[in-house]
Image (tube, rainbow, N blue to C red):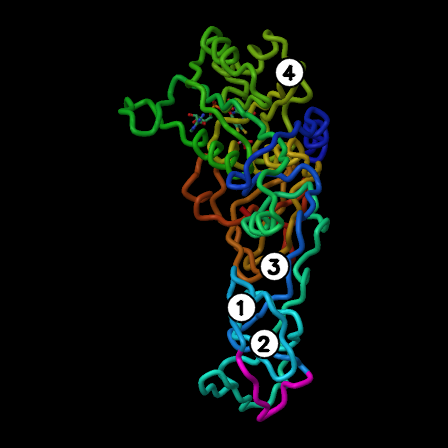
Amino acid sequence: MISVDEALARLFALVSPLGNETVPLISAAGRVLAADVAARRDQPPFAASAMDGYAVKATEAGLHAQFKVIGESAAGHGFDGAVKAGQAVRIFTGAPVPEGASHVVIQEDVERRGDLITIVAPQDQGDNIRPLGTDFRSGDAIAGPRRLSPEDVALLAAMNVAEVPVTRRPTVALISTGDELVMPGERPRRDQIIASNTFGLHALLTRLGAEPRLLPIARDNRESLETTFWLAQGADLIVTIGGASVGDHDLVGDVAAAMGMERAFYKIAMRPGKPLMAGRMGNAVMVGLPGNPVSAMVCGHIFLAPMIHAMLGLGASRRPALKARLTRPLGANGPREHYQRAIVDQGKITVFDRQDSSLLSLLSRANALAISPPRAEAMPTGAEIDYIPL
Ligand SMILES: Nc1nc2c(c(=O)[nH]1)N[C@H]1C(S)=C(S)[C@@H](COP(=O)(O)OP(=O)(O)OC[C@H]3O[C@@H](n4cnc5c(N)ncnc54)[C@H](O)[C@@H]3O)O[C@H]1N2
Ligand code: MOO
């Protein structure tokens, strides 16, 4: 059995960044910006008032100074003339500061009678003007590759960028296998269960920026598996769930091999996740996940997530681990790298007692996976352990 690191290295060797496509800005959030994108204008494109008040010359803006109001500058409606000595222009937040003015007196600091204003408070809190280009200049770039946040989208809009180059979303064919499976909402027989991790993986892949496709459940026979693999054609990644172990009905590895899958590995020193398999199948990468619900989801976090990142052009690296201190002693580990469901709260981690890989209720309660390396010794309360947030 190979280590988790070795399995990841072999998975990274199977994938490469996908090509680009252009999308309108409205659909860009969550996508991966594929190249640097430059601003098409300065922001603000003019010196702008930061407050509602009166634009005057800074040299004249002393306490008790008086000015004649000669016009108005509002956002979207600038004042065309220039401000001369003794003059003021009524101005509003976001409006262009007129030529000749260099200070905005906020209206709370002014007494107005007709066209005349008097400054009634000292002007020592800045000029209330945002200089041209203070946010960004034309040509300033937002750097790719990066996953575009809502904040990035706002910045791109301000830069007058209407469409952006993004990495194509990896398409993932999700194949559940097993005679016992029915879909949520169906009426199962007593000996059937509901396909659950299929939906968990679909949600995880969607969150990662992939485009998952649920294929019909493959039954535990060669014909059904073959048909479903055919249906998966065209996907970048084919992910099977279940049928990976050694039982008489675990046919995924055999059928995939018969259909030309070149195996990169089978079985890893990881708990849960031991029967993981992967390889190349035509133009696609195939990953066979173990069927136990928690095993499938944990493998999704530890292997599928970094693979999708790499395909999106975000680099090939293991998910970074954080550190927390144990609230209780932890027993020694066996030969497999152990990923245990746990709750992290303010730097302290409580590892659950029960870790059976069928227990989705505990996975749903957990917010972290504590990681014990193979053959790790027992750890006392307060010892630091690596974990991956969920
Ligand atoms: N003799 C051995 N038996 C097993 C070994 C072993 O080394 N020797 N490994 C065990 C480990 S570890 C795991 S993990 C499981 C993985 O088995 P499979 O990948 O073949 O999964 P199945 O047998 O098909 O299913 C296991 C379990 O999970 C349920 N399941 C399957 N698919 C789904 C789904 N989409 N949604 C919800 N639940 C699903 C299935 O009904 C079974 O209960 O093998 C051990 N056995
Ligand atoms: O490796 Mo299995 O995934 O322990 O339950």
Side of 319 where 255 appears, left or right: left
Q: Position of residue 192 (x, y in %)?
A: 33, 23
Which quadrant of the render holds ligand 2?
top right
Q: Which residue is mark 4?
A: 283
Q: CA distance from mark 1 to mark 4?
A: 61 Å
**Helix, strand or loop status at disc 2:** strand
- Counting from the top left corner in percent of width and height, residue 16 is at 70, 27
Callout 4 amino acid = Asn
> Quick one: label 4 or label 2, which is nearer the N terminus?
2
> What mark, if any, has residue 73 been given in the picture?
1
The residue at 61%/23% (across/down) is 277
Q: Is mark 1 within 8 Å of ligand 1?
A: no
> Which residues, given as a range, are shown in magenta?
59-69
In magenta stretch: residue 60: yes
Q: Nearer the viewer, mark 4 or mark 3?
A: 4
Front in this rendered view, residue 323 or 307: 307
Three-letter code for the amino acid on which mark 3 is drawn: Arg
Left or right: 5 as drawn, with respect to 214: right
Residue under circle 3? 325
Mark 2: few, some, or many residues within 10 Å (few <14, many ≥20)? many
Asked if the stretch drawn in magenta spans residue 272, the answer is: no
Three-letter amino acid code at disc 1? Answer: Ser
Q: Nearer the viewer, residue 143 or 113?
A: 113
Do tag 1 and tag 2 residues touch (Cβ < 8 Å)? yes
Closer to us: mark 4 or mark 2? 2
Structural distance between the alpha carbons of marks 3 and 2: 58 Å
Q: Which residue is mark 2?
A: 55
